[in-house]
Amino acid sequence: MTALVALAIGYLLGGLPTADLLARAVRVDLRSAGSGNPGTANALRLGGRRLAAAILAVELVKGAGAVMVGRALGGDPAGLASGAGAVIGNILNPWYRFRGGKGLGITAGVTLAVWPVAVLPAGLLVWALARVTGSNAHAAVLGLLAYLAGAGLWGLLQLPNWWGIEPGASLMIFALALVVIVTPKLIRTPAANPAGLGEDGEGPR
């Protein structure tokens, strides 16, 4: 029961339309201009670095905050449920007829609380893959698969996880859940042009 409550709380937190609100504060409409995606790349393109950085920072806080709230309610299981709920709420945004972002920024925030040692390597890997493939969406899918493999290895070897959850089956199952939640949205994204500035040129959201 606690996990379900945490899932619902995470969903509501993840669904908060913070990217749209921040953009509108500087008179930018992310949904009707550029790629139409309320993500950091579209914010960078339309509003500049400060707007993009602000949106990404808030997404990180929302993701990590959801996990922390869940943990306070019921330990690691509730924290994982709340984190998953936040990613779902970000993608299936209840404020915009379940049309949200790609869930990458908030996934990074959730990871910051659940598996902190993976945040920087995962970010660098996705960046490198985007440069090689010319597609942020394809790079993110490959990065998620690497994320899943890494979580399995981390749990198998019981490697240190700083302030995150205890490495083991829970970490592996959670990584699999994130792959299942986020990948379909990325796959539905049209292929990018060689410069990576097409519809899937969006960064985290």
Image: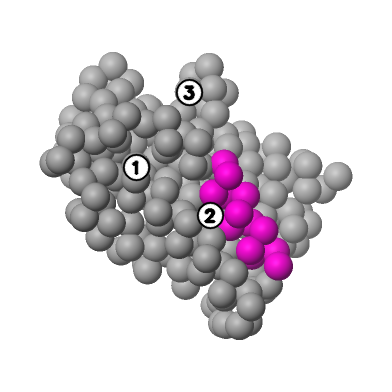
Amino acid at pointer 3 = Arg
For the point 47% across and 72% down, the residue is 117
Closer to the N terminus: mark 1 or mark 2? 2
155 or 73, which lies in front?
Answer: 155
Disc assigned to residue 99: 3
Q: What SS does tag 3 mark?
A: loop
Say which of marks 3 and 2 sits in front: 3
Q: Is residue 179 visible?
A: yes
Badge 1: few (under 14), some or many (20 or more) residues near its Cα, within 10 Å? many
Disc assigned to residue 110: 2
Q: CA distance from mark 1 to mark 2?
A: 19 Å
Q: Which residue is mark 1?
A: 137
Quarter of the figure with the C terminus:
top left
Amino acid at pointer 2 = Val
Amino acid at pointer 1 = Ala
Quarter of the figure with the N terminus:
top right
Q: Main secondary structure of the magenta part?
A: helix
For the point 33% across and 50% down, the residue is 139
Vertical order, 165 against 174 (above or below) = below
Q: CA distance from mark 1 to mark 3?
A: 17 Å
Q: What SS does tag 1 mark?
A: helix
**Magenta stretch bounds:** 169-181
Residue 104 in the image: state x and y as whole percent: 42, 46
Say which of marks 1 and 2 sits in front: 1
For the point 64% across and 65% down, the residue is 171
Q: Is residue 113 located in the magenta-colored stretch of the structure?
A: no
